[in-house]
Image (tube, rainbow, N blue to C red):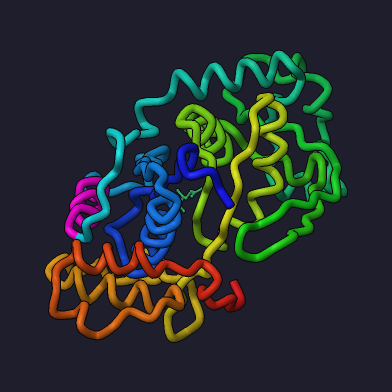
């Protein structure tokens, strides 16, 4: 069992649109995990890519979280204000030989048996000063790690072909770098997130090790799908949550997490729903559907 005094969890949405039911389920799971361990729960806005983020989305997400009683225990962290930290992390990784400049596309890599045609990993000098992406140099590995809900995970990590981009050619920092740098900076002990990110975890573990930091525990909750079996997301036009129905939304989200909220909650307040949920939270009741 997690030592309650040390538990620090977070919800880290990318503001590509307003909060929808699927993201509420994830937010609620991470909140309840943290609160049932008497831990801290933080909100972080992962606003790394202004081209994919309507300017109003961040405000809408934060309003929705408030309306559902989900308040961050510390000031909200914005990744758009963390560029210096990402820059330093990249410099550090490069000085250790764990990151390199590269302009290869995935297509080029595939056409070359997954190897970099210009040997970018070993010859930084070859790329002169033209704008280029920075990639993390993965080690080939058969990785095993323990998910708090799904159990032992096995993941094959392939050097070169899978080397994740840390900073894009256009200058934007990438999720794989920023999520690790910020979870370290914020002292996050436990990450609860959607299982669509399960396959990212083995790579993130290698980035933690390259930054000589202790990785958190991970718990991946099943993602909510629509009638066509697609993940609820902005691309699939998942409707924004109606904040006026916060109690009903929480009731639905608890049901989606396999909890059994009594109908009487529907006549009560957001606070009463969250209090019930915290007291009765059972991680083991989450349905293990396909991801
Ligand atoms: N920002 C990511 C998303 O909205 C989640 C990151 C994470 O929880 O690791 O999908």
Q: Main secondary structure of the magenta part?
A: helix
Q: Where in the figure is residue 145, as x and y percent of width and height?
A: 73, 51
- Seen from the viewer's position, the closer of residues 242 and 281 is 281
The quadrant of the rendering that contains the C terminus is bottom right
- Seen from the viewer's position, the closer of residues 280 and 197 is 280
Q: Is residue 102 left or right of residue 113?
A: left
Q: Residue at x 61, y 30 (%)?
A: 133
Q: Where in the figure is residue 112, as x and y percent of width and height?
A: 85, 46
Q: Is residue 273 left or right of residue 110?
A: left
Q: Is residue 63 highlighted in magenta?
A: yes
Q: Where in the figure is residue 7, as x and y percent of width and height?
A: 48, 42
Q: Is residue 42 above or below residue 271?
A: above
Q: In which quadrant of the rendered view does residue 238 lie?
A: bottom left
Q: Is residue 189 highlighted in magenta?
A: no
Q: Residue at x 33, y 49 (%)?
A: 15
Q: Residue at x 35, y 65 (%)?
A: 279
Magenta-colored span:
57-67
Q: Is residue 174 left or right of residue 210?
A: left
**Number of marks drawn:** 0
Residue 235 is at least partly visible in this image: no
Residue 197 is at least partly visible in this image: yes
Q: Is residue 78 above or below residue 201?
A: above
Q: Residue at x 33, y 67 (%)?
A: 277
Q: Is residue 128 above or below residue 290?
A: above
Q: Where in the figure is residue 128, as x and y percent of width and height?
A: 68, 15
């Amino acid at each position: 069992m997690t030592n309650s005094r040390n538990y620090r969890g977070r919800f880290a949405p990318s503001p590509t649109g307003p909060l929808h039911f699927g993201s509420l389920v994830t937010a609620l799971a991470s909140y309840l995990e943290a609160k049932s361990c008497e831990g801290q729960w933080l909100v972080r806005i992962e606003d790394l890519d202004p081209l994919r983020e309507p300017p109003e989305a961040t405000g809408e997400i934060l309003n929705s979280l408030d309306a559902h009683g989900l308040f961050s225990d510390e000031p909200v962290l914005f990744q758009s204000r963390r560029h210096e930290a990402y820059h330093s992390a990249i410099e550090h990784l490069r000085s250790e030989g764990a990151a390199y400049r590269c302009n290869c596309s995935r297509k080029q890599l595939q056409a070359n048996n997954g190897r970099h045609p210009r040997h970018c990993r070993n010859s930084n000098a070859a790329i002169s000063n033209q704008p280029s992406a920075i990639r993390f140099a993965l080690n080939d590995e058969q990785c095993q790690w323990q998910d708090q809900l799904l159990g032992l995970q096995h993941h094959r990590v392939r050097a070169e072909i899978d080397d994740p981009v840390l900073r894009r050619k256009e200058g934007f920092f990438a999720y794989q770098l920023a999520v690790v740098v910020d979870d370290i900076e914020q002292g996050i002990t436990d990450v609860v997130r959607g299982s669509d990110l399960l396959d990212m975890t083995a790579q993130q573990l290698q980035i933690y090790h390259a930054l000589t930091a202790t990785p958190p525990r991970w718990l991946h909750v099943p993602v909510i799908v629509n009638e066509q079996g697609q993940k609820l997301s902005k691309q699939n036009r998942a409707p924004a949550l109606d904040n006026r129905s916060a109690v009903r939304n929480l009731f639905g989200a608890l049901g989606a997490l396999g909890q059994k909220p009594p109908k009487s909650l529907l006549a009560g307040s957001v606070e009463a729903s969250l209090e019930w949920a915290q007291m009765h939270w059972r991680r083991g009741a989450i349905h293990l559907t396909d991801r």
